[in-house]
Image: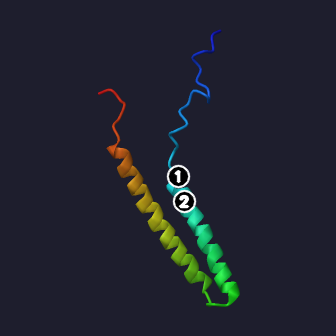
């Protein structure tokens, strides 16, 4: 059996990398924002209401996910397709 047609990791073009996923970036920003807010609250600079903080983070995350998804879909629609018509 000839295995010469099986693609290997050495055959792949490593110059093309996949862009970061929108969800990963948004959740990373949420974690960073929560960490920053916890540090600020522990230093006593401001007093935070946990409910308002969570509401604000969820609204911001929702907007970021929707906008990121729309931008991603728009970018994907502009790329030429390889399907035969």
Looking at the image, which residue sits at the far left? 85
Residues at marks 2 and 1 touching, judged by CB atoms closer than 8 Å: yes
For this view, does 15 lie left or right of residue 83? Answer: right
| Numbered disc total | 2
Q: Residue at x 37, y 31 (%)?
A: 82
**Image quadrant in which the N terminus is located:** top right
Q: Quadrant of residue 63?
A: bottom left
Viewer-nearest residue: 14 or 48: 14
Looking at the image, which residue sits at the far top? 1
Could you say which disc has been placed on residue 20 in the image?
A: 1
For this view, does 37 lie left or right of residue 15? Answer: right
Q: Residue at x 61, y 87 (%)?
A: 48
Residue 50: x %, y % from top left: 62, 82
Residue 24: x %, y % from top left: 56, 57
* Residue under pointer 2: 25
Label 1, secondary structure: give it: loop
Label 2, secondary structure: give it: helix
Q: Residue at x 61, y 26 (%)?
A: 8
Seen in the picture, residue 15 relative to 57 is either above or below; the reply is above
**Image quadrant in which the C terminus is located:** top left
For this view, does 57 lie left or right of residue 85? Answer: right
Residue 47: x %, y % from top left: 62, 90
Residue 41: x %, y % from top left: 66, 85
């Amino acid at each position: 059996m000839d295995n010469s047609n099986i693609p290997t990791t050495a055959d792949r073009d490593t110059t093309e990398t996949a862009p970061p996923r929108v969800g990963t970036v948004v959740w990373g920003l949420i974690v960073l924002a929560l960490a920053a807010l916890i540090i600020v609250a522990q230093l006593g600079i401001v007093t935070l209401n946990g409910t308002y903080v969570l509401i604000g983070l969820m609204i911001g995350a929702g907007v970021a996910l929707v906008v990121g998804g729309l931008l991603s879909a728009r970018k994907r629609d502009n790329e030429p397709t390889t399907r035969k018509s």
